[in-house]
């Protein structure tokens, strides 16, 4: 067993984590300027930004740092948001341009963290948005034109037909948009590295410190089983794992399941035959598949998103046929790891940022596209706590619907909607 075997998620990432630091549970009563709830990217980056501004910060994580989606995801570091077009419609032209620039800033923050704190997380540039049909290819063509008009600062190119073989060794696609500004990484090693960075700045981190109650007022009191934190402000960054702790956030997001398999290590030649430039890839379907090569040349293949909250009886059996459809040459490859987890999905697929009672702040609902936007959210949370609400309010002003009828009813309705999208994807509409 790996030294980090206390982490109950048997993923490829937990098996290859390079920092097994254990942070103590909270014991007794402590005071801080800000308490952060959640040890994923959002919470850690808010803590880093606040500490850099001189705030005394305590961070509480219910399990281990990176235990949730931040340590289990596909590792694709993609700028922007899950649905940039919908963000633009909701905000209007002027604010939409600001949001587009913020999407670029999120990626810059991520790379800045990796470089400044020397985080070993196998970051590699290169990402391909792959089109399965002509409709998706035309959408990518329009996206390329929009990027050129906006002065997108990174190299990108549209490849159609057989030209896509330069980056993907598959005949499944009609084309793809190759972006050298986006990339991929080992998400748990990034998360653990950011925890180490936060601790180096004076942030007090406590694991196995699940919050049981929040007493509100001008000064909040955040309770765990073994202690409590008194703080002037609280950052709520539990995302899909809040479990109703903050009533105002109930029903704003649905915890959707997403799953990944990792093959055996592949030979250099075999890996190069799949992804010649080692770029990360995701297709253009609403219920998309995504994949990339790990540092030790495994293919990590993910997808199979569902809104039922149920894990497939056999994750590998559910995903391997999809993987072999993309890469027939992987038929018979051994699967060494299979895992899943929950991601917080909002109805409009736009991240949710807001405030409660004047001294509680939250960010959530990245809708499966959270590695980069969560880093931006951490900065915006620190800005608003420090008294500058301008950029935070770009997102806080967006109205979000609550999921109807509670999680079970909402899950059933969304599953029905996703069945429609699955049919649309299959028919190429």
Image (tube, grey):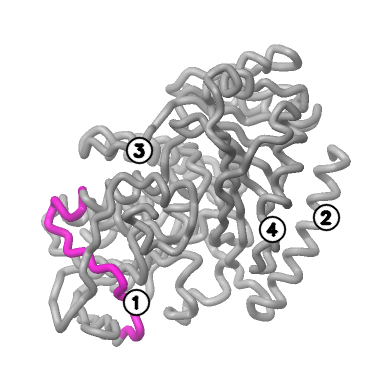
Q: Quadrant of the N terminus?
A: bottom left
In this rendering, the label closer to the viewer, 1 or 4: 4
Q: CA distance from mark 1 to mark 3?
A: 27 Å
Compared to residue 153, the image places residue 312 above or below, namely: below
* Residue 216 in view in this figure: no
At label 1, counting other C-alpha atoms closer than 10 Å, the crowd grade (few under 14, some 14-19, many 20 or more) is: many
Residue 345 falls in image quadrant: bottom right
- Whichever of labels 1 and 3 marks the residue nearer the N terminus, that label is 3
Disc 1 designates what residue?
210
Residue at the image point whose x is 49% and y is 52% from the top: 11
Q: Which mark is residue 314?
A: 4
Q: Which tag is nearer the camera, tag 2 or tag 3? A: 3
Secondary structure state at the residue bearing disc 4: loop
Residue tagged 2: 420
Tell me which label, 2 or 4, sits earlier in the chain.
Answer: 4
Disc 2 versus disc 4: distance between alpha carbons?
24 Å
């Amino acid at each position: 067993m790996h030294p980090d075997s206390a982490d109950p998620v048997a993923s490829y990432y937990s098996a290859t984590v390079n920092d097994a630091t254990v942070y103590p549970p909270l014991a007794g009563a402590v005071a801080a300027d800000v308490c952060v709830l959640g040890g994923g990217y959002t919470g850690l980056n808010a803590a880093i930004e606040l500490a850099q501004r001189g705030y005394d910060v305590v961070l509480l994580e219910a399990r281990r740092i990176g235990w949730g989606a931040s340590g289990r995801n596909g590792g694709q570091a993609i700028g922007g948001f899950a649905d940039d077009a919908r963000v633009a419609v909701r905000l209007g032209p002027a604010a939409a341009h600001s949001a587009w620039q913020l999407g670029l800033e999120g990626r810059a923050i991520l790379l800045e963290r990796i470089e400044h704190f020397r985080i070993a997380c196998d970051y590699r540039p290169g990402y391909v948005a792959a089109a399965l049909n002509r409709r998706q290819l035309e959408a990518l063509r329009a996206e390329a034109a929009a990027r050129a008009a906006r002065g997108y600062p990174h190299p990108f190119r549209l490849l159609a037909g057989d030209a896509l073989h330069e980056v993907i060794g598959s005949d499944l696609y009609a084309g793809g948009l190759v972006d050298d500004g986006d990339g991929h990484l080992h998400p748990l090693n990034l998360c653990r590295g950011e925890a180490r960075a936060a601790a180096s700045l004076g942030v007090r981190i406590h694991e196995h410190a699940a919050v049981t109650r929040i007493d509100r007022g001008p000064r909040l009191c955040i309770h765990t089983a073994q202690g409590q934190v008194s703080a002037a402000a609280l950052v709520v960054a539990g995302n899909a794992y809040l479990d109703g702790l903050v009533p105002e956030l109930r029903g704003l997001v649905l915890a959707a399941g997403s799953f990944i398999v990792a093959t055996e290590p592949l030979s250099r030649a075999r890996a190069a035959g799949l992804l010649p430039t080692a770029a990360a890839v995701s297709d253009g379907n609403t219920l998309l598949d995504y994949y990339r090569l790990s540092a030790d040349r495994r293919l990590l293949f993910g997808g199979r998103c569902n809104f039922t909250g149920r894990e497939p009886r056999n994750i590998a059996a559910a995903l391997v046929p999809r993987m072999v459809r993309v890469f027939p040459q992987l038929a018979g490859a051994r699967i060494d790891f299979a895992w899943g987890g929950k991601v917080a999905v909002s109805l409009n697929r736009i991240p949710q940022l807001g405030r409660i009672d004047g001294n509680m702040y939250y960010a959530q609902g990245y809708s499966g596209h959270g590695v980069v936007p969560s880093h931006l959210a951490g900065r915006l949370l620190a800005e608003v706590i420090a008294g500058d609400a301008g950029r935070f309010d770009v997102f806080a002003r967006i109205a979000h619907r609550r999921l109807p009828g509670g999680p079970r009813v909402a899950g059933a309705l969304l599953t029905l909607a996703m069945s429609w999208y699955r049919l649309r994807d299959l028919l190429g509409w």
